[in-house]
Amino acid sequence: MSYQCLLSAAIQVLPNCLMSEWSNIVCLVGHLVRADQVHVQFQTHYMKHLPLVDLTGVKYELSLLQFTSDVMCLWQTLYGFMMQEKSGEGFWFHLNQCCANTLKSVFSSLSHPATSQAFLLSQAVCHVCHLLSILPALGTESMFVLVLDWLSELQADSVLKYTLLYRETIEESIRLIQNEQWSQTLLKKLL
């Protein structure tokens, strides 16, 4: 199955879905990824060097993170004009809430080695910070809280020494957020 076809279908279907339906669709994409039925070309944001992480072990989470990010970025490109209209407020609020809830469930029970977990969480932070920098603010509070939670997980004793490898990467992505108060709060949490 073509990833572009999957994205095209998701862009048409997901805005009309409830939060539980979002989770089911993303779970279906996850099954397709695990069965090697679809290949998601994931991007590492702001990485200056490749980590010493076996990416095949974290392919599932990275693919779902990339899929969700791609869907949100494409919606912003296609429907960005709705940011200015009152009629678009409900649309963006719903999408942002569903995106945050979906990513939270994907990353809620990570059980990878510390090196992989630090890499995954740092990439999750970078992807969501990128979304926070381009999406309308309606409903993004839940994404902000999600990033705060992930930063707390990155400061756990088991992954902290590996987190230091990605500190610059995370800081760079946080600085992209236009909401100065959020950006400063996240930077303080990172320190």
Image (spheres, rainbow, N blue to C red):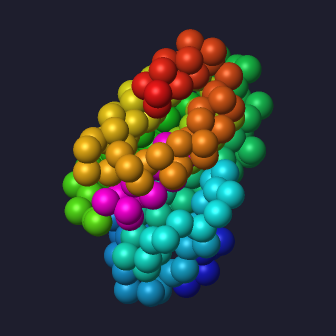
Residue at the farthest top position: 181
**Residue 171 in the image, given as x and y percentages of width and height:** 59, 36
Question: In the image, what residue occupies the spot 45% across and 58% down?
Answer: 119
Position of 93 compared to 130: left or right?
A: left
Which one is nearer the viewer's eye here, 103 or 151?
Answer: 151
Q: Residue at position x 43%, y 25% from top?
A: 189
Q: Main secondary structure of the magenta part?
A: helix
* Residue 175 colored in magenta in the image: no
Picture quadrant where residue 35 is located:
bottom left
- Residue 9 is situated, as x and y percent measured from the top left of the image, at 57, 64
* Residue 190 drawn at (x, y percent): 46, 31
Q: Residue at x 22, y 55 (%)?
A: 109
Which one is in front, 174 or 19? 174
Give residue 47's quadrant in the image.
bottom right
Q: Which residues are magenta?
A: 114-126
> In this view of the protein, can residue 100 be seen by the observer?
yes
